[in-house]
Image (cartoon, rainbow, N blue to C red):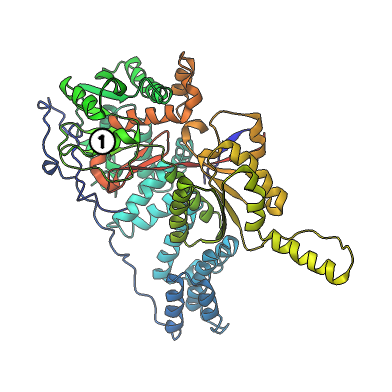
């Protein structure tokens, strides 16, 4: 059974209450000053500009303006049925401009109900010259959003770059373009660059490729300055996206870093896997002839508390601390009122950390990120009505809440949910969720009424077009996925969090054939050199591949700490997913779509 990545190759303000103090983040290209630990108020990250309103030319007046506005109001309320009924009152003999407005609004209604083919047909129904200029720009933005939701990142970015030439002040659009480029593969961008039709689009692709190919902040700084000299009037040149502006200004590397991990006790195997991922990057840098900082690895279990281990790191001269690993240890450091040295924690706490003194940034493999992502992936595919299956208990309920919030915000609807407390309950719970018990009861009633034994095939409910599976383990997923097919739901797409896959190929995974998974890039082929180096070691930690990736991303974020000063604009392409900073200084992770292909 092979897990394959699926990819089509065709915002907000920086936190105010949680001000970033990144003691290592900025510097100059001349000799840096001695490191100090200023207060959180001394460095305030620049807030990205608010997206400017769309600068549309005026729409031509029409006798049907009231009807069109009523339709738009219904669409804003996600009421596609009322929108279509309102447009049905229009006559057939509309002029070209009104016909294009009607078709565009019908396309939006079709998208809301998940009919992507009709959406595409309506958007291309008439000649482009019939479309008013104001509507043409709105159509382009709608088409970009559809491509983005569908995972056609390069198409979305290319359309966005075209719109930006007409709306150069739109910071939100610049942010969206950069995020789409970071989602795209290097090979796809290189191919697109060879065929790029205009200078602005070429500039975007060149910038993304320079960022992708840089091995360290110093070489990236040189690449950014060279790009800016070549593209002085490019929309991204004034303020480089994703936090790259802070790299371009110069970065002083730390002289000493402390890695805080529980290297003995219950969490030792996990800690070793994280350490291996981190050290693979560290030694690769040394092999390239770079001069990495001094690294201290501190066993947190040898100290009475995480705070004590943090204190030792500071006393030994660490300028940044990576770790600790457990949620409890991260929560403890989060309550330190004045941190003299910034912390990149390797777990996510339930409550916000105090953000006075130096920053505490949280990087993790939180399953909540997977839950949000499968909602987005399903909606982008055209699904709108979901069945949700989850284990009973606090974790299952928490993931359901996260998924439901994102699913409903997008416009999806959950028509049935089922929770299960044991393997014995799997089948009955699925039957109930699919209304098969009701179908069987109807058949029984008919047999009784006719006093004969008629042939009968149960009929499941027909109002679902996607199933969300929040399994706790691969064992659960391998049991539940075949049961869905057994209970007549085998043709409905099933999306699951990464907990459904162990990360290690297993012949038993054939039961997951067709499952769509939110997975980390590391397991789908990113950074092959590091993975080979870890596998060649004698620790055996490559069996904990996701934790290897967490360690690799800890090194990445630490080396690019300067970018985090961009706040919500900061964006890093990691081995655990696309990383962006939220207002509580948690790095939200966007995994990628993977599908079990049956091979």
**In x, y percent, where is residue 503?**
53, 31
**In x, y percent, where is residue 198?**
39, 48
Quarter of the picture holding the C terminus: top right
Q: Which residue lies most toward the right here?
A: 452
Q: Nearer the viewer, residue 27 or 354?
A: 354
> Residue at 76% of width from left, 59% of height from top?
458
Residue 161 as seen in the image, left or right of residue 231: right
Picture quadrant where residue 3 is located: top right
Q: Is residue 596 visible?
A: no
Question: Against 292, is 514 above or below?
Answer: below
> Residue at 47% of width from left, 51% of height from top?
397
Picture quadrant where residue 172 is located: bottom left
Q: Is residue 286 visible?
A: yes
Residue 469 as seen in the image, left or right of residue 255: right
**In x, y percent, where is residue 86?**
51, 80
Number of marks in the rendered image: 1
Q: Nearer the viewer, residue 200 or 220?
A: 220
Q: Which residue is mark 1?
A: 332
Q: Nearer the viewer, residue 459 or 216?
A: 459
Picture quadrant where residue 250 is located: top left
Question: Against 52, is 18 above or below?
Answer: above
């Amino acid at each position: 059974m092979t897990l394959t990545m699926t990819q089509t190759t065709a915002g907000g303000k920086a936190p105010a209450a949680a001000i970033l103090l990144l003691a290592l983040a900025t510097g100059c290209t001349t000799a840096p000053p001695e490191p100090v630990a200023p207060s959180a108020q001394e460095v305030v990250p620049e807030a990205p500009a608010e997206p400017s309103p769309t600068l549309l030319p005026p729409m031509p007046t029409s006798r049907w303006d009231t009807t069109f506005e009523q339709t738009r109001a219904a669409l804003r309320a996600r009421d596609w049925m009322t929108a279509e009924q309102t447009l049905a009152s229009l006559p057939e003999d509309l002029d070209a401009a009104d016909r294009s407005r009607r078709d565009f609004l019908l396309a939006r209604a079709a998208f809301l109900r998940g009919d992507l083919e009709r959406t595409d047909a309506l958007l291309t129904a008439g000649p482009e010259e019939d479309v008013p200029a104001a509507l043409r720009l709105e159509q382009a933005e709608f088409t970009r959003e559809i491509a983005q939701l569908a995972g056609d990142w390069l198409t979305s970015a290319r359309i966005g770059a075209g719109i930006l030439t007409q709306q150069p002040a739109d910071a939100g659009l610049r942010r969206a373009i950069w995020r789409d480029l970071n989602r795209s593969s290097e090979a796809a961008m290189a191919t697109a660059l060879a065929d790029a039709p205009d200078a602005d689009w070429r500039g975007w692709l060149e910038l993304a490729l320079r960022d992708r190919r840089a091995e360290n902040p110093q070489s990236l700084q040189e690449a950014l300055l060279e790009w800016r000299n070549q593209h002085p009037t490019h929309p991204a040149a004034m303020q480089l996206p994703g936090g790259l502006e802070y790299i371009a200004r110069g970065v002083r590397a730390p002289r000493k870093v402390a890695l805080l991990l529980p290297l003995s006790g219950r969490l030792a195997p996990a800690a070793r896997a994280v350490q291996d991922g981190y050290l693979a990057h560290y030694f690769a840098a040394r092999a390239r002839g770079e001069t990495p900082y001094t690294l201290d690895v501190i066993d947190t279990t040898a100290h009475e508390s995480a705070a004590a281990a943090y204190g030792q790191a500071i006393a030994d001269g660490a300028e940044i601390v990576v770790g600790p690993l457990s949620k409890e240890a991260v929560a403890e450091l989060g309550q330190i009122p004045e941190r003299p040295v910034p912390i990149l924690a390797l777990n996510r706490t339930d409550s916000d950390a105090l953000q006075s003194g130096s920053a505490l940034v949280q990087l993790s493999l939180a399953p909540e990120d997977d839950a949000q992502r499968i909602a987005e992936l399903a909606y982008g595919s055209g699904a709108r009505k979901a069945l949700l299956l989850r284990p009973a208990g606090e974790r299952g309920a928490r993931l359901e809440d996260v998924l439901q919030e994102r699913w409903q915000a997008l416009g999806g609807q959950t028509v049935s949910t089922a929770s299960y407390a044991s393997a014995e309950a799997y089948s009955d719970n699925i039957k109930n969720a699919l209304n098969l018990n009701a179908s069987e009861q109807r058949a029984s009633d008919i047999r009784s009424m006719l006093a004969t034994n008629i042939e009968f095939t149960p009929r499941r409910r027909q109002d679902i077009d996607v199933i969300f599976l929040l399994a706790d383990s691969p064992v659960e997923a391998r049991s539940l996925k075949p049961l869905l097919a057994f209970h007549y739901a085998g043709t409905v797409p099933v999306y699951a969090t990464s907990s459904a896959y162990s990360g290690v190929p297993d012949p038993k995974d054939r039961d997951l054939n067709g499952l769509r998974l939110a997975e980390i890039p590391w397991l789908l082929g990113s950074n092959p050199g590091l993975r080979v180096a870890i596998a060649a070691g004698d620790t055996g930690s490559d069996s904990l591949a996701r934790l290897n990736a967490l360690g690799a991303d800890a090194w990445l974020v630490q080396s690019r700490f300067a970018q985090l000063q961009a706040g919500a604009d900061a964006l890093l392409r990691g081995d655990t997913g696309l990383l962006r900073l939220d207002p509580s200084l948690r790095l939200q992770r966007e995994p990628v779509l993977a599908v079990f292909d049956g091979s």
